[in-house]
Amino acid sequence: MPPMETPPHTRGKTAAGGGMERKVTGIISNISPDTGKMTITDASGISITFSTGPNMDLKDFRTGDQVVAEYSSSGVIQSIEKQTE
């Protein structure tokens, strides 16, 4: 029996400082620039709510945007990019 593949939202690499950096690809299902919170739903339907870093500007992101986000093991988005179709 082949080993199970690690789900995309849990794959990661060691970041500078020793923490684990993870990546999620999905659609923004909720965003609140005032609180710095964002929920991303991946292709399997799993929704994860993240905090954003203090220097992250969310004004260019909207609900429904397809994005790829890298986040820390504590659930703070380190970088996010819109994906084009």
Image: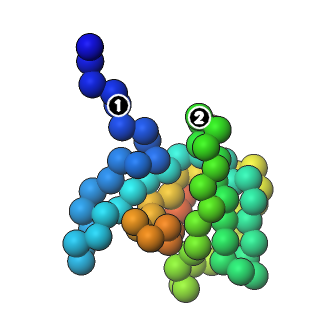
Q: Residues within 10 Å of mark 1 (few under 14, many from 20)?
A: few
Left or right position of 74 against 38: left
Spatial CA span between label 2 and label 1: 14 Å
| Furthest residue toward top | 1
Q: Is residue 9 above or below residue 56?
A: above
- Identify the residue at horizontal 33%, vertical 27% (top origin): 4
Q: Quadrant of the N terminus?
A: top left
Circle 1 is placed at which residue position?
5
Circle 2 is placed at which residue position?
44
- Identify the residue at horizontal 43%, vertical 41% (top origin): 8
Q: Is residue 30 above or below residue 25?
A: below
Question: In the image, what residue type sits under mark 1?
Answer: Glu
Residue 71 picture location, percent across and down: 45, 64
Pick the front one: 76 or 62: 76
Q: Is residue 40 above or below residue 44?
A: below
| Furthest residue toward front | 1
What numbered label is drawn on residue 37?
none
Residue 53 picture location, percent across and down: 52, 79
Question: In the image, what residue type sits under mark 2?
Answer: Ser
Residue 43 picture location, percent across and down: 59, 36
- Identify the residue at horizontal 73%, vertical 53% (top origin): 29
Q: Residues within 10 Å of mark 2 (few under 14, many from 20)?
A: few
